[in-house]
Image: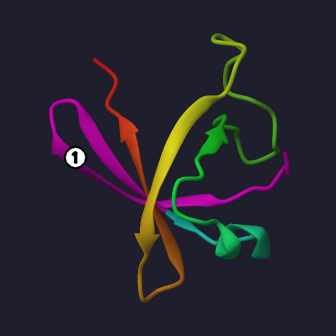
Amino acid sequence: MRLTQAKIERIRRINPQVIHLELGMIDESLYRIKPGQTLLARLVDASGEPLAWDPYLREQWWPLGMTGQNTLIVEHPADP
């Protein structure tokens, strides 16, 4: 597992259950993600500290593709 950081550039609600996030690239390793791989993500503040430790395990995000602005689009379940 490789630790990296990215910035959420844009959020789009696709339907009541799913949102798409556009992640601005900060680390080159995100360029090499392959189909079928997923990201384990935890939201952090500007200083890099986690916003919450509950749940302790990271959330699973599913990459959908790259945009022309060098951002990675991921699918994420919307919170109720």
Q: Nearer the viewer, residue 49 or 74?
A: 74
Q: Is residue 25 above or below residue 64?
A: below
Residue depicted at x 26% and y 38% = 18
Q: Is residue 60 above or below residue 62?
A: above
Residue depicted at x 72% and y 14% = 56
Q: Nearer the viewer, residue 59 or 51?
A: 59
Q: Position of residue 75 (x, y in %)?
A: 38, 48
Q: Position of residue 12 (x, y in %)?
A: 26, 54
Left or right of 76? Residue 4 is right
Residue depicted at x 51% and y 42% = 61
Q: Nearer the viewer, residue 47 or 41?
A: 41
Secondary structure at numbered mark 1: strand
Quadrant containing the C terminus in the rendered view: top left
Label 1 is placed on what type of residue? Arg
Q: How is the image coloured?
A: rainbow
Q: Residues within 10 Å of mark 1 (few under 14, many from 20)?
A: some
Whether 5 is among the magenta residues is yes
Count of numbered circles on the image: 1
Question: Magenta span: helix, strand or loop, mainly?
Answer: strand
Residue depicted at x 66% and y 76% = 31
Q: Is residue 58 above or below residue 48?
A: above
**Magenta part of the chain:** 1-22
User: Where on the picture, by quarter, is residue 45?
Assistant: top right
Residue furthest out toward the bottom = 68
Q: Position of residue 50 (x, y in %)?
A: 75, 29
